[in-house]
Image: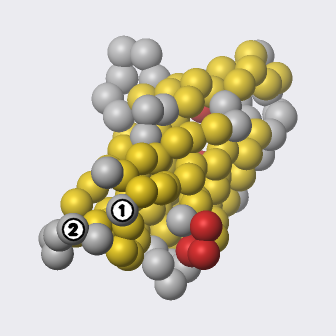
Amino acid sequence: QVHLVESGGGLVQAGGSLRLSCAASGSIRRINTMGWHRQAPGKQRELVATITSDGNTNYIDSVKGRFTISRDNAENTVYLQMNSLGPEDTAVYSCNANLQTTYGWMYMNYWGQGTQVTVSS
């Protein structure tokens, strides 16, 4: 089995910062792309940022210059540093990993349970 566990969410004032972490564990052979998504109340889930195994990153326009995604391949962990947070960033943030397990050859997407980020104005 594979587990993705997020941490680091919470309540922060506008202009503040938070750092999210997501650790993947279990029967993992190799992880390809990892990413962060978010879903605000009443809105569809959106992809916030991704990072490939060799460190190439992509961001949605609304977080460029404020958020930074990074990963530690040795620890199977992805991070999201969020700066200059605003109320519009309030959402449940979930990580995902496209990975290959030790008991199969296909790459599949696995998800964490999500962590709440609330930004007060």
Q: Quadrant of the C terminus?
A: top right
Its colouring scheme is secondary structure
**Residue in the image at 43% along x and 16% along y:** 41
The disc placed on residue 27 is 1
Amino acid type of the residue tagged 1 in the rendering: Ser
The reply to whether residue 84 is visible in this rendering is no
- Residue at disc 2, secondary structure: loop
User: Relative to 47, does residue 113 appear above or below in the rendering?
Assistant: above
Amino acid type of the residue tagged 2 in the rendering: Tyr
**Residue in the image at 82% along x and 34% along y:** 15
Q: Residues within 10 Å of mark 2 (few under 14, many from 20)?
A: few
Residue 73, given in percent of the width and then of the height, sits at 57, 74
- Residue at disc 1, secondary structure: loop
Q: Looking at the image, is mark 2 or mark 1 earlier in the sequence?
A: 1
Q: CA distance from mark 2 to mark 1?
A: 7 Å
The reply to whether residue 116 is visible in this rendering is yes
**Residue in the image at 38% along x and 75% along y:** 30
Q: Quadrant of residue 109?
A: bottom left
Q: Is residue 114 left or right of residue 84?
A: left
Q: Residues within 10 Å of mark 1 (few under 14, many from 20)?
A: some
What residue does disc 2 label? Answer: 103
**Residue in the image at 42% along x and 57% along y:** 26
Q: Is residue 7 left or right of residue 59?
A: right
Q: Quadrant of residue 55?
A: bottom right
Q: Looking at this view, is 85 or 5 the one in front? A: 5
The disc placed on residue 87 is none
**Badge 2 vs badge 1, beta-carbon distance below 8 Å:** yes
